[in-house]
Image (cartoon, rainbow, N blue to C red):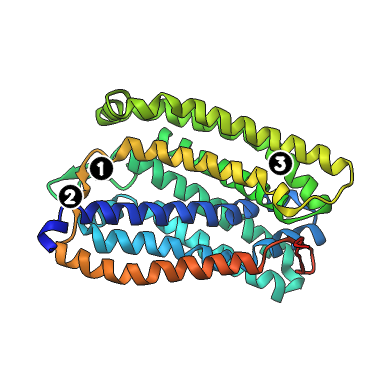
Amino acid sequence: MIAELTPALPVIWAVIIAVAIAMYVFMDGFDLGIGILFPGFRVGEERDAAMNSIAPVWDGNETWLVLGGGGLLAAFPLAYAVVLPALYAPLIAMLLGLVFRGVAFEFRWRDPNHRRRWDAGFTLGSVVAAFAQGIVLGALVQGIAISGRAYSGGWFDWLTPFSLLTGAALVIGYALLGATWLVWKTTGRVQDDARRYARRLLPLFALVVAAVSAYTPFLEGKYWERWFASPGIFVAVPMPLLVTLATWRLWSALRREAARHMGRDDPAPFADGAAFGWTLILFALSMAGLGISIWPDAVPGRISIWQAAAPADSQLFMLAGVAVLLPVILGYTAWAYWVFRGKVDAQGGYHSHDH
């Protein structure tokens, strides 16, 4: 049985890791985005409402980062051994940013005398973590120098114009996710401010996504072939149209919500969630484009998932554990979001609109 599954196991594990990374981007992206936008909200009730909108879920969102990183180590140890030395600096910066924002998140409530400093730390940690994640993505896509089975590049090979572009793109994208999350989850002035920020960020996000997409095929010959040769071209042709459609629908959703709220009606919370939903679709399309570029490589352009894979026995053993744990993670995540559904106010109370 193991012999029959051996060719498929790396594919299964690649899908699991891709899903974990996507879930992390979707879920931790919006709370990082709120940290990025935090200085734009008024001190007091606005900032408190923004914080309270993510307080029940932000810790659990980072579970997916652990699953993605742990899965890479366990299922593709060669890729892990190559990628880490190449990206030590931005990965350490990302982890320090996540730690610092987590500390600031907790201490702003416990130490009100220094809340402004903790708020600044929350923003700084969020920006550093988001920017470092974008740099990691850009450095992976642009290629990692390998000699034999080890990294052979320098300490600063990750620092290039393309990685800086992807870093900026992810900061803007996370800020857009955070803004549309707040449009969904809050009311009053903080919602109005979030909607205004979303409308300003959307054109910027569309611009940087277009720039990254135009840049990527020229980084590596394989990328060009995967996008413009069969069967990749059948996905590449409709992709710009789908991204344009999603961008237009997001813009339209933000305009409709602004017009509706000027009428002072009381919409259901899922009506306000349309903008957040379309933002997630934009991210999903961007990640699908990235997947087309790098599949089936574990280290883009260098090492395939089959070359990087752990022994089949090890992958099968770990797969049994994931088969139990993944439904548990999905279950408690869904339950947490369901329990804390509805709008939130500055005092942390949720207002369900289920009548």
**Where residue 217 appears, x then y in whole percent?**
34, 27
The residue to which callout 3 is attached is 197
**Where residue 179 appears, x then y in whole percent?**
67, 47
Q: Which of 40 and 271 is in front in this view?
A: 271
The residue to which callout 1 is attached is 296
Give the alpha-carbon distance from disc 2 to disc 3, as whole Å.
Answer: 44 Å
Give the alpha-carbon distance from disc 2 to disc 1, as whole Å.
Answer: 9 Å
- Sequence-first tag of 1 and 3: 3
Q: Mark 3 belongs to which amino acid?
A: Tyr
- Sequence-first tag of 2 and 1: 1
Q: Which of marks 2 and 3 is in front?
A: 2
Where disc 3 sits, the SS reads helix
75 to 197, vertically: above or below: below
The residue to which callout 2 is attached is 306
Q: Tell whether label 1 touches label 2 (CB within 8 Å).
A: yes
Residue at the front extreme, as displayed? 355
* Residue 29 showing in the rendered view: yes
Q: In which quarter of the image is the C terminus?
A: bottom right
- Sequence-first tag of 2 and 3: 3
Q: Mark 2 belongs to which amino acid?
A: Trp
x 24%, y 60%: residue: 75
Q: Mark 1 belongs to which amino acid?
A: Pro
285 to 57, vertically: above or below: above
**Where residue 207 appears, x then y in whole percent?**
55, 29
Where disc 1 sits, the SS reads loop
x 52%, y 63%: residue: 61
Q: Is residue 211 left or right of residue 205?
A: left
Where disc 2 sits, the SS reads helix
Q: How many labels does the image show?
A: 3
